[in-house]
Amino acid sequence: MTPKDELLNQAARAYNAFQQAIHGLSEDLLAEVWFGTWGVREILAHVSGWQREMGPALERITRGEKPIPDGVSYDDLDAWNARFVAAKRDWSMEDIELELDRSHEYVMHLALQVPEERVRPGKTAYMIIDLNTANHYREHAEQVLAWRASRNA
């Protein structure tokens, strides 16, 4: 199995675990603020926002271009996170969950297009895929599960 195959399999498994971490939560619990100024709702908006933002980077890598266009900076992660959450503030929870599924499918589809030699540990494409899928899903699944355990939810 190639590093790319392993990474995409990890992403799929981590996504399933992330879905299980939020499964069965009521609308009230999904909206409850417990992670700074966020709850599960905002976490989902944030994850899908990053996936949509990084999709074009994977497209550029596939074409042999640099991933991030000139003039774009991701140095202020808090500002980007706030932007992603604010963009979905008026969305229904159902639409946020649907967008999470769609953005996952989107980024996985684009990851499949990236040439094998570009998806190896230490390479930019590998890091973009990992940070916006498997690693991101695990990070937030762990947080959600810890919160759920703390309140028996």
Image (cartoon, rainbow, N blue to C red):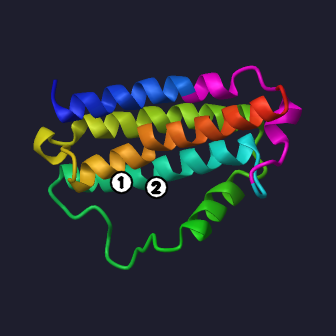
Q: Is residue 140 above or below residue 76?
A: above
Residue type indicated by callout 1: Pro
- The residue located at (60%, 26%) in the rendering is 19
Q: Is residue 136 shown left or right of residue 35?
A: left
The image quadrant where one finds the C terminus is top right
Q: How far across and how far down the image is residue 43, in percent?
A: 66, 46
Q: How far across and how far down the image is residue 123, in percent?
A: 20, 53
Q: Which mark is residue 56?
A: 1
Residue at mark 2: 53
Label 1–label 2 contact, CB within 8 A:
yes
Q: How far across and how far down the image is residue 102, in percent?
A: 52, 33
Range shown magenta: 18-35
Q: Quadrant of residue 133?
A: top left
Q: Is residue 117 above or below residue 63?
A: above
Q: Is residue 132 shown left or right of residue 7?
A: right
Q: Is residue 61 in the magenta section?
A: no
- The residue located at (15%, 41%) in the rendering is 115
- The residue located at (65%, 27%) in the rendering is 21
Residue type indicated by callout 2: Glu
Q: Is residue 5 shown left or right of residue 53?
A: left
Q: Quadrant of residue 10?
A: top left
Element carrying mark 2: helix
